[in-house]
Amino acid sequence: EPEVTQTPSHQVTQMGQEVILRCVPISNHLYFYWYRQILGQKVEFLVSFYNNEISEKSEIFDDQFSVERPDGSNFTLKIRSTKLEDSAMYFCASRLAGATGELFFGEGSRLTVL
Amino acid sequence: GENVEQHPSTLSVQEGDSAVIKCTYSDSASNYFPWYKQELGKGPQLIIDIRSNVGEKKDQRIAVTLNKTAKHFSLHITETQPEDSAVYFCAALSYQKVTFGIGTKLQVIP
């Protein structure tokens, strides 16, 4: 069964450092997402990406965040200068197309900022 | 934007009993309502979904109902088992964006 894969599974970084989280969405999917989940809290939308551009972003997704689809298979989330409050699980998701396509999630990347 | 409210935040049931989780949404343009189960340390896994042209859907022990007029939808789990213990999230899709509820931690007591 096709799946969304994410790397790394866990990253520890110092405050102020840049972090790149990587995702390989399901191959024929067209919409890509990043969500964040702070420990014990809800899954929060960060950004959606379609047709090689951001289609929507939340207020969390400020200038410190960026996304990229560099090579047609990977989908990356970059945090330019990490803050303590960026510590969370980051989930990548993808879906095929259409108004009601199922959203598939990866297993997540746990980011710990010290 | 869409706002999804979910309750209860925690729910304990005896094994074999039923569990019901309720959600409301605000955006009348939302037309797809998935439910996710999240086990500790894992990503959300879709367990059932319902589209806006359907009022009820059932898959074995799991059922979901949707009332578009009232903008609420519910998850029903019957004959609960210990392996049903997890956090359950409702969600709503509006304009390509999926918004999640806060989650319900379900504990099934053997």
Image (cartoon, coloured by chain):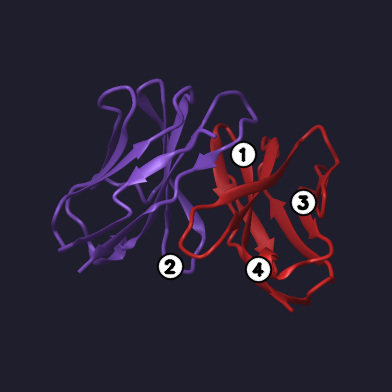
Q: Give how far across and how far down residue A1 sits, in percent.
A: 54, 34
| Chain letter for mark 3 | B
Colour for chain B in the figure: red
| Residue on which disc 3 sits | B72
Q: Give how far across and how far down residue A8 sits, in percent.
A: 29, 50
Left or right placement of residue B69 versus residue B2 in this view: right
Circles 1 and 4 on the same chain: yes
Answer whether labels 3 and 2 touch (C-beta < 8 Å). no
| Residue on which disc 2 sits | A39
Front label number (1 vs 4): 4
| Chain letter for mark 4 | B
Give how far apart the Cα atoms at labels 1 and 2 are.
Answer: 24 Å
The residue depicted at 53 percent of the width and 39 percent of the height is A104
In the image, residue B105 above or below residue A106: below
| Chain letter for mark 1 | B
- Label 1 or label 4, whichever comes before in sequence order: 4
Q: Which mark is residue A18?
A: none
Front label number (1 vs 2): 2
Give how far apart the Cα atoms at labels 1 and 4 are.
Answer: 25 Å
Front label number (4 vs 2): 4
| Residue on which disc 4 sits | B85
Give how far apart the Cα atoms at labels 3 and 4 are.
Answer: 23 Å
- Label 3 or label 4, whichever comes before in sequence order: 3
The chain whose colour is purple is A
| Residue on which disc 1 sits | B93
